[in-house]
Image: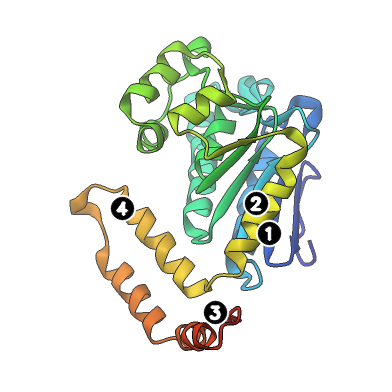
Amino acid sequence: MEGLNLQTDKMGASIQDGVGTMTYNNPARHNAVDHAMRCAIIDILTAFSENPDVRVVVITGAGGKSFVSGADISEFDAKRSSPEQIVAYNEVSRRVGEAFAALRKPVIAMVRGYCLGGGLNTALNADIRIATEESRFGIPAARLGLGFGFDNVTKLVSVVGQAYAAEILYTAKRFSAAEALQMGLINHVVADGALEPAIREMAQSIVANAPLTIRALSASLEEAVKDPDKRDLAITSRLIEACMQSHDYAEGRRAFREKRPPVFKGR
């Protein structure tokens, strides 16, 4: 992507027709995420956040066998063994989470193949998850002796509920796409050949909608899953009011009267 100087070729970024695509490009290791990749993720998401041409973000994995298989365990001895290393590792992970949270644009996960551990955490950063029939999901922390962060548990519970979250975490098993769909872990299951068209259709349907409304909805969805006493309803009110005062709202009403598709400008 022009103007973005990544320090690794294991992450890719592109923008087309209002859609920013971030690709985990480490297929030799099933798109396991190493330190350099995590740093690149922060840069890509920040660039997408600041670019008004990006209205929707799609995240996916290269190679066809895996979305993201999790953290690169081969690095753990060198980067995640001592207390100091664990603190540094967790700090970068926190910054990745903050970059996703600050995006405030719809995120769609295009899942093909394995979606495990940190990969499932990555998919949970998306608002919408679409997978192929062959995709597999799981969090193997209990098999590795890893501590699994409270924030990650909370995110999983908010998506599938406590009972299914307990099953996913306690058993550490791999679940089929059909099981993941039943749990509410993913939105849709499609045949492998239908995945990219399904993603493209959904992304473009969002791109065609009013950006200010999408931003307000994104903020409201984020606040809705927080404890009531921690919600910032002032920000949602400001964003909703901005919609009502916008050029796009006038254009939406005008297009409805004229029986034509609206052309939204994001202002």
Assess disc 3: are there few (<14), some (14-19) or many (≥20) residues with their C-alpha within 10 Å of its C-alpha.
Answer: some
- CA separation in Å, label 2 and label 4: 23 Å
Q: Secondary structure at mark 1?
A: strand
Specify whether 144 is left or right of 65.
left
Q: Residue at x 67, y 49 (%)?
A: 199
Specify whether 260 is left or right of 224.
right
The residue where tag 3 is placed is 266
Query: Is residue 108 among the parts visible in the rendering?
Result: yes
Q: Residue at x 60, y 40 (%)?
A: 130
Mark 4 residue type: Ala
The residue where tag 4 is placed is 224
User: In what quadrant of the picture does the N terminus appear?
Assistant: bottom right
Colour scheme shown: rainbow
The residue where tag 1 is placed is 20
- CA separation in Å, label 3 and label 4: 24 Å
- For the residues bearing labels 1 and 2, Cβ distance under 8 angstroms: yes
- For the residues bearing labels 3 and 4, Cβ distance under 8 angstroms: no
Mark 2 residue type: Val
Query: Is residue 126 among the parts visible in the rendering?
Result: no
Residue in front for this viewpoint, 3 or 198: 198
- For the residues bearing labels 2 and 4, Cβ distance under 8 angstroms: no
- CA separation in Å, label 4 and label 1: 26 Å
Assess disc 2: are there few (<14), some (14-19) or many (≥20) residues with their C-alpha within 10 Å of its C-alpha.
Answer: many
Mark 3 residue type: Gly
- CA separation in Å, label 3 and label 2: 20 Å
Q: Residue at x 73, y 49 (%)?
A: 197
> Which of marks 4 and 2 precedes in the sequence?
2
The residue where tag 2 is placed is 58
Q: Secondary structure at mark 2?
A: strand
Locate residue 31, reporting x and y percent: 72, 32
Assess disc 1: are there few (<14), some (14-19) or many (≥20) residues with their C-alpha within 10 Å of its C-alpha.
Answer: many
